[in-house]
Image (spheres, helix red, strand yellow):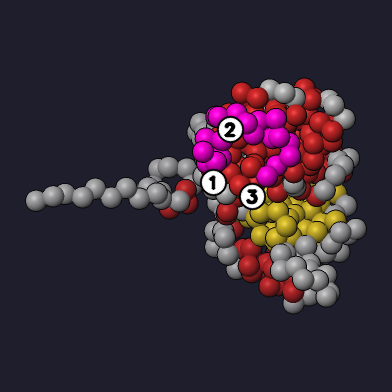
Amino acid sequence: MIALLLLIAVPAAAQDEGTDPWFSTFSIIAFDPATSELGVGVQSRAFAAGAAVPFAKPGVGAVATQAAANRLYGPKAIALLEQGLTPAEVVKRITDEDPGRDTRQVAVLDTKGRSAVYTGKHVIDRNHDPKDVVHYGAWAGHVTGKNFSVQGNTLASEAVVNAMADAYEHGTGTMAERLMAALDAGQSKGGDVRGMQSAGILVVRPIPPGSDSTVERIVDIRVDDATNPFVELRRLLNITMGVPAKLTEHAAQLARAGQFSEAIEEQKKALTITPNQEQMHYALAQRFAQAGRAAEALAALAEAVKRQPYLKKQAADDAIFEKLRERADFKKLIGSQ
């Protein structure tokens, strides 16, 4: 007889009794009236919080549901906002209907910039229960500002949410970048006392009338399990924001100006962000070739064509590789001999 052992990943809220089911979390929800963007940023010492906490619908509102997260809060709150209820009315309605509300924390924001937050009694009490060795001495609460709300539980102190609010209010760049800055600021003040594990950023925007676009979720990234999820989250955000392409274009400009060493370093930065992109390796080969560093150019080109063989023909016709064309190793790489 052959015995099969099945290992099943169990969500935090459904684990065996005795484990901690809480999404001990800090988050920010925001609305930018200039762009009509709504966003949510979150970090938690729990698996896959980026999939459980944030909800947002363009033109309607954003929701963060955490602590013992009730995932039904998100769609319910959005539906109630669409019916014309204020965030305060929405929060009251969904928590009044929930017998488990004392274990919840939820924040709701609409496109008028109004927000409301509910933190259940047990969410607060557990942080001050000396018998609770995991959460004792931690903090739960929120701070709101114009067009945003920051909330958290099991936090190092109130300084976490205050730092997040300050970073968002005084941040620059896109909403996603400001949300990332807020998360960084919260972590710099101690964040979740249990540590880090997962994070996510969600930004939505209405599709303009007459646009050919079908994308409302302009940023939708998450890291489900990492020692420091912000490292990977920022890398994913940079990809989403097109940073590697911008670095690559700058590197090409530097090379055209004869600044070859600077161009190579700029292209290496792009490759660090997106190491699986064959075009980043190809561009690095170009920069090495322009610098007269043939061996390194061939090594980078070999990596590019290994990932995508179609680049062999592109390289064969590329004027940047003119000085390499008579080399046997170049001919062998592109298949011309």
Of residue 149 and residue 173, the one placed in the foreground of this image is: 173
Give the percent coordinates (x, y) of residue 29.
75, 52
Measure the C-alpha gap from mark 2 to mark 3: 39 Å
Relative height, residue 228 to residue 242 (above, below): above
* Sequence order check, earlier mark of 1 and 2: 1
Q: Can residue 130 be seen by looking at this rendering?
A: no
Relative height, residue 315 to residue 36 (above, below): above
Of residue 107 and residue 314, the one placed in the foreground of this image is: 314
Give the percent coordinates (x, y) of residue 122.
58, 48
Q: Amino acid at mark 3?
A: Ile
Q: Which residue is mark 1?
A: 309
Side of 223 relative to 170 (left or right): left
Measure the C-alpha gap from mark 1 to mark 3: 30 Å
Q: Which mark is residue 99?
A: none
Q: Which mark is residue 221?
A: 3
Mark 1 Cα shell of 10 Å, populated few (<14), some (14-19), many (≥20): some
Q: Main secondary structure of the magenta part?
A: helix
Q: Amino acid at mark 1?
A: Pro
Q: Can residue 256 be seen by looking at this rendering?
A: yes
Q: Please state which of the two labelled residues, at mark 1 or mark 3, is closer to the viewer.
A: 1
Labelled pair 2, 3 in contact (Cβ < 8 Å): no
Q: Amino acid at mark 2?
A: Phe
Q: Which mark is residue 330?
A: 2
Q: Please state which of the two labelled residues, at mark 2 or mark 3, is closer to the viewer.
A: 2
Q: Please state which of the two labelled residues, at mark 1 or mark 2, is closer to the viewer.
A: 2
Give the percent coordinates (x, y) of residue 210.
83, 75
Measure the C-alpha gap from mark 1 to mark 2: 14 Å
Image point 47% across, 43% down: which residue? Answer: 20
Give the magenta-colored segment's residue range. 317-337
* Sequence order check, earlier mark of 2 and 3: 3
